Structures are given as C-alpha cells and as structure tokens.
Image (spheres, rainbow, N blue to C red):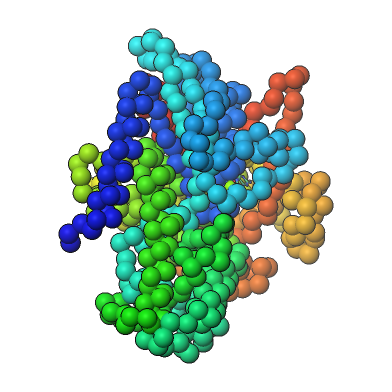
Amino acid sequence: MAPSLSDLIEEARLSARALLDYGEHLFSPAVRLGVTGLSRAGKTVFITALVHGLTRGGRFPVFEAFDTGRIARARLEPQPDDGVPRFAYESHLKNLIEDRCWPDSTVDISELRLVIDYQRQNGADRSLTLDIVDYPGEWLLDLPLLGKSYGQWSAESLALSREKPRVHLAQDWHAQLATMQAEAKEDEQATLQAAKLFTDYLRACRDERFAMSLLPPGRFLMPGNLAGSPALTFAPLDVAADGSAPDGSLWAMMRRRYEAYKDVVVRPFFRDHFARLDRQIVLVDALAAFNSGPEALHDLEAALTGILDCFRIGHRTLLSNIFRPRIDRILFAATKADHLHHQSHDRLEAVLRRAVAKAAERAEYAGAAIDVVALAAVRATREAQVQRGREKLPSILGTPAPGETANGETFDGETEVATFPGDLPADPEELFKGAFRGLSSSPSENADFRFLRFRPPLLERQGAEEPALPHIRLDRALQFLIGDRLQ
Ligand SMILES: Nc1nc2c(ncn2[C@@H]2O[C@H](COP(=O)(O)OP(=O)(O)OP(=O)(O)O)[C@@H](O)[C@H]2O)c(=O)[nH]1
Ligand SMILES: [Mg+2]
C-alpha cells in the first residue's frame, strides 16, 4: 500500500526526534525505560521501589554492577520533558513507608530521571542517565488500531463481545445496536447512547470478577480531559469489514470519529512516547486472572499477544531506514509474587512464559530480546508453615488491608494473619486448559485461589537511616533491563 501524506509527515517527525535523541545520547549514555501494564498491575509501586532501592541502597545480589560496588551512587535529576508530569516519587514513597498504604491509582503518563554514577569494568568512571516512563498499558493496546479500519475494528470488537463471559455483559449495548441502521442519517443522540452503553460494557468486563484485559479503545475507560469529545464518542456497528459508508450516514460519522481517535490519541502517543523508548518492562497481574477464572487468563493471553505485536508495529508501518523502533529488550514481569509461597514463584513465571510464548517468537524475530520474571517490587508478606490437621501447609503471613474479608472475618488493618492462597500447578498447561475455578463462575468460597490484599510491610528502622524495602527478584529485573549498559 502506498504511504499516505500523513504517514510521511509522521515519519519525518519521528526521524527528526530520533536524530535529536541520538545526538544527546552521543555525549552521555542514556536509557529510556518504559514501565507499563494494565490498570492496577503495579507500575507505580515498581518504579517507587526501584528508585528507592537504587538511591538508598537496597539489597540487590543479582544486579551485578550494584552488588560488586561499581555503582558509586544514583541520584534524581530534574525531569527533562517539559510537557510530561513528573512521577511523584516522594509522595508515593511516603505512602509506602510512612503510611503503610499503597499509592493511589495514576491515570496519566509520568516520567522521572535518575542518573547512575558507576565505574566501568575497565575502571573508567561514567554516568548513565535512566529516564523512567510510567504509562498505562491500555494506551499500548490501542496501537494495533493504527493498522485497522473502522469496519475491521467493529467486526473484531463485535465478535469478541459475543464470546463468554462478555456476551452477558454486552446485553444492553447489543440490544441498542440492533435498533441502529448503519446507513441511516447520522444521529448524535443515538451515537451518544451507543458510546455510553459500549463503555458500560467495557467497564463491566474490567470488574474484578471478570478481570478482562483486552478492552480497546483504552481511553474509553480513562478519558482524562478528552471526556465527552467526539473522538471518544463512537461505538462499533454491525457493518461489513470492507464495506463503504454512504455520505452523511451514521456509519460515516462513527468512522470519522474512530479515525479522529487515532489522530488525537493513538498517533501522538506513538510518536511522542512509545517510539522513543529503548527498553520496556510490561507488568502483568496474573493473580487477578487466576482469581477470576479461565476466561480471564485467555483474555490476558490475547492482550499480551497484542502488546508484543506493538513492538513490531513500527517495522510494518514506518518506511525509512533512519528511524526504527529502538526497543531491544522487553521484560514481562508477573507482579505481586509475594502473594504466593516461594515454591510457586517459578510456577508463576512458567505461566507467564507460556502466555507470551507464541508472540515472543515473533518479537524476537523483530530484534528484541525477551525475558520473563515473577517478582514483588515490595514484599508485603513473610512465609510460614501452618499445621492444618496432619498436614503442614506452606502459608504466607501478612497484614490484610482494612476491610478485606476471608471466611466471614473482616480485617481491621492491624492484625497479621497466616493464609494459604492456593498452589499453582507444576504444569502451566493445566491452567490454560481451564482446570480451575474462579470468581467469574463460582462463589468465592469455592474458588481455587484466594488472594488477600496486604498492607505494605512494617519496616524496622536502624537509627536515622531509611530502611530498605524488601522485594522478590527486583534485582533480576534490573540486571536484565540495564545490567548490560553498566559494563
Ligand atoms: N503485595 C503486593 N502488592 C502490590 C505490589 N505491587 C502492587 N501491589 C498492589 O497492586 C495495587 C496497584 O499497584 P500500583 O503500583 O498502584 O499499580 P499501577 O499499575 O500503577 O495502577 P494504576 O496507576 O491504577 O494504573 C496496589 O495498590 C497494591 O495493592 C507488590 O509488590 N506487592
Ligand atoms: Mg499507577
């Protein structure tokens, strides 16, 4: 297909930006690390723990440059991108350490600059600038829309909404859809109604019981300052994927707005943020999918495939040799591993590896190295063996957040309890075959997994020193993401 004028302009902008970044990097080595994941995956906690560990001296035995003492210090510098909010590190850290509560949900992109002074293996002193960019995974899942027409997107969205368990949640929207004539005259009120019912359906899919992951367009559930604008007021119609819309029709209006969404939301994100990343970590809350049931796990798998495809999208949609998407390392991390006994940590990793396996082959082909890890950026639990009858069960100890309930008991946020969250199977295939029960199909007492939300850990202070935050495998993530840049 011949490139359109807008593709060419887009490419020229990208090339100019890439050259500018390249010029800056010539003089001081830099890495732009993207941290993404769907809502509540653990992005804010991950970045806070990572920055705290590097600047205040965490325990990172597997992060070689740190462990061997070659890192002299790491310090925060002013956030360099004038149009992007600074990551509110200090207030997130206060939440975790002083208040012992988790930081609030963040809906926008934010950025933080960390400079690491280190000694090269040959003895020379150097500094590495690490720009950390926190952005919603929902924005990433929008990138595939760039390659889809309104008709294709409508057909795919409708097909997905007719699968279980989505079809039950889509009833109201489907009923309204059946009353709309795509070729009739454009109608603002019908479109508003359709967009509202479609958004309600997406929101219901995201609910904890169903924990669906694949819900584009991402801004429908996090509209920010675009709420109510035409670019966010459209919905799928039951039209032929390759059909043509009559002028002035409802169909033409929906299609125009879908294209506006790509122009106003998706392209700027691709150009200003995604295309500038060097490394990427994708955080995944696999436990939320286990909690919900087999359909949520399959949906997560589809979302991860969609995410990995994004890392190849530049190769297909951009033309020049000057600019290439630069991401050369992608780490998939299952977060909140502290909810499981350590015997299950490798198993959690195996589930994630299985979920990204097929898509990973394709991305590796496109030039990026991929790895998988199960981690807890902040470890909120300890381990214990609990006697139940004759059996000793490997359990975890933690302080459930106030209001959490288990076996009819509601916790006050002060008492520590031992729980048995459930074991993951040795063979991940068992989960993918659907051999487990979750909240989407059973009452909570029959679900195979039960994860309580714990408060952040109580830390012991020694003198005025700020205590290190305990973690699980955060150092392995660091080694993969930046270890090679500190050689
Ligand atoms: N136990 C434990 N819980 C965690 C950890 N990381 C995140 N959580 C839990 O997951 C929730 C979401 O974490 P955030 O870091 O706010 O997630 P996010 O991806 O930034 O979420 P949004 O800003 O809403 O997109 C927290 O409120 C905690 O309950 C962890 O390492 N251990
Ligand atoms: Mg956040």
Q: How many marks?
A: 0
Does residue 160 sit above or below 51 in this rendering? below
Q: Which residue is more in the foreground, 468 or 141? A: 141
Report x, y in % for residue 447: 61, 67
Residue placed at 63% from the left, 50% from the top?
Answer: 105
- Of the 4 image quadrants, the one containing the N terminus is bottom left
Q: In which image quadrant can residue 410 be found?
A: bottom right
Report x, y in % for residue 416: 77, 46
Q: Which residue is more in the foreground, 343 or 156? A: 156
Report x, y in % for residue 131: 47, 33
Res 402 seen here: yes
Residue placed at 74% from the left, 60% from the top?
Answer: 406
- Of the 4 image quadrants, the one containing the C terminus is top left
Residue placed at 61% from the left, 73% from the top?
Answer: 442
Viewed as shown, does residue 311 lie left or right of 230?
A: left
Residue placed at 55% from the left, 22% from the top?
Answer: 75
Q: In which image quadrant can residue 183 be found?
A: bottom left
Report x, y in % for residue 42: 57, 47
Does residue 409 sit above or below 83 in this rendering? below
Q: In which image quadrant can residue 389 be found?
A: bottom right
Q: Which residue is more in the foreground, 227 or 307? A: 227
Residue that protrudes farthest toward the top in the picture: 123
Res 428 seen here: no
Q: Which residue is more in the foreground, 415 or 16? A: 16
Residue that protrudes farthest toward the left in the picture: 2
